[in-house]
Image (tube, grey):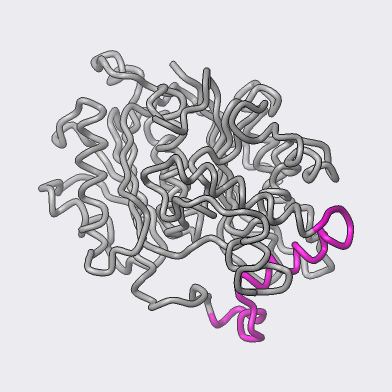
Amino acid sequence: MSTGSAALPAPVHVVGAAMIPMGRHRRSSYAGLAVGPVLDALAAAGLGRERVRAAFVGHSFGGMLTGQRVLKEIGLGGLPVVNVDNACSGGASAVHLAARAVAAGEYDVVLVVGVEKLTQFGGGTLPLVTEDPEVRRGMVMPALYAMRARRYLHERGTIDDLAAVSVKARRHGARNPYAQLRSEVTAEQVLASRPIADPLTLFMCCPTGDGAAAVVLVSDRARAELDGPAVRILASVLHSGEMDLGARDMLHPEITFASARDAYEAAGMGPDELDVVELHDAFSIAELIYYEALGLCPVGEAGKLLRSGETTFGGRVVVNPSGGLLAKGHPVGASGTAQVAEAFWQLTGTAGDRQVEGARTALTHVTGGGIAGLDHGACTVHVLRAG
C-alpha cells in the first residue's frame, strides 16, 4: 500500500492555530462552534481574513455546505471551499488536501477547519452506514475495539495495560484547558467504571461531544512576510484501507503501518527522532496497538513501552500530551485538525502546562471509519518540525 504522495513538492508551514474547549455545546450550531477558532487562528498567524485564498473543512455529520455556512458568518465568500467527509480522519484529511494545494503553488494562504457537533444525536454510539453488512448485524465502534482488546489480552498483556492508558490520558488532559475531561483517575476507578463492551469500561472509551479547531497553512513566500512562529509540515500521508474479506490480525492495523512507513520516508527521519505524538486513541487499546504500528516500539512490546514511562512527560516521546481523544474528547471531524493545532503549540513552545520540553518534531495520526472488509476506511499521518 503506497500512494507516493507523502512528500510535499514545496515547503508548507503552519503559522496559526486555535480551538475551542471540547465538550457539550448543545446550543451551538456548526458555524457557532467554528467561527471563533477561525478568527483566532488567523489572528495568531497575523493575517487578515482577506488573505485567505481557499478553505478546506473537515466534518462527518454537518450536512451539506458546512464550510460555506461557517465562512459566510465572517464574510468569507467567493473563494474555493472544499468540504471533507472522511469519518474520524476528516479534519486531518482537510489538512492533507490544504498542504498539497499550498505545496503545488495553487494558494499562498489556506484555512483548514475541523468541526463536529455530536450532541445532535443525544448520546449513544455514533450512527454508521446501514448498507454495510457488518453494521446491519450490529457492529458499532466500541465492539470493534473491544475485539481488539480481547485479542490483546489473549496474546500480549493484561487489563492493567488498558487501564494504564486511560490513567495517563486523564493525567495529561488535566493540564489541557481544551480537554473535555480534566480530572485525573486511578486504575481502580477505570476498571470499576461502567462496562461498555467487554473488556472495555467507560473510562477506556473516548467521550463524545462537540468541538472545532482551525489551522492556517502558508507557502514559503507568505511565511517570509510574517513575524510569528511557524512549523513546517515535512510529510502528509492519506491512505484508504485495502479490501480483505479473510481473517484479519486484530493487532496489526496495516493501514497505519503503511501510512507511518511512507510518512517517515518522506520526512527523512524515523520514529526514534520524534518528541511528540498525537495518535488516535478513541479507545485505550488503540494507543497500545498504534505504539507498534507507528514504530515507537517493536511489535509485541507496547505494554512494556507504556509501563516504562517513556510515553509521558519526561519520557523519550510524549504520546498525546493533550490528553488524546480519551480525555480531550473526540468530535469526529474536528479531531485531526485539533491534533495539528496541538503539534503547532508543542513545537512553538506555547502549549502551557502541558508543554513537552525541547520539542522539535511531532507526528499526528488519525484513522477513520469502520467498513466491512477494510482495516479502516482512511488514515492520515503528518510529520512536523519546528522552525
Residue 193, quarter of the rendered image: bottom right
Tell me: residue 331, above or below residue 382: below
- Return the residue nearer the eye: 213 or 155: 155
* Drawn side of residue 39 relative to residue 111, left or right: left
Question: In the rendered view of the protein, which quadrant contains the C terminus?
Answer: top left
When the figure is inspected, residue 300 is found, relative to residue 266, above or below; the finding is below
Looking at the picture, how far across and down is residue 19, in whole percent?
32, 44
- Residue 38: x and y, percent? 24, 43
Disc tally is 0
Residue at 58% of width from left, 44% of height from top? 279
Residue visible at 39% across and 77% down in the picture: 121
Residue range highlighted in magenta? 130-158
95 with respect to 55 (left or right): right
Examine the structure image and report whether residue 131 is included in the region drawn in magenta. Answer: yes
**Nearer the observer, 163 or 370:** 163
User: Can residue 255 be seen in this snapshot?
Assistant: yes
Residue at 87% x, 53% y: name it.
156
Q: Is residue 238 visible?
A: no
Query: On the rendered structure, is 73 left or right of 180?
Result: left
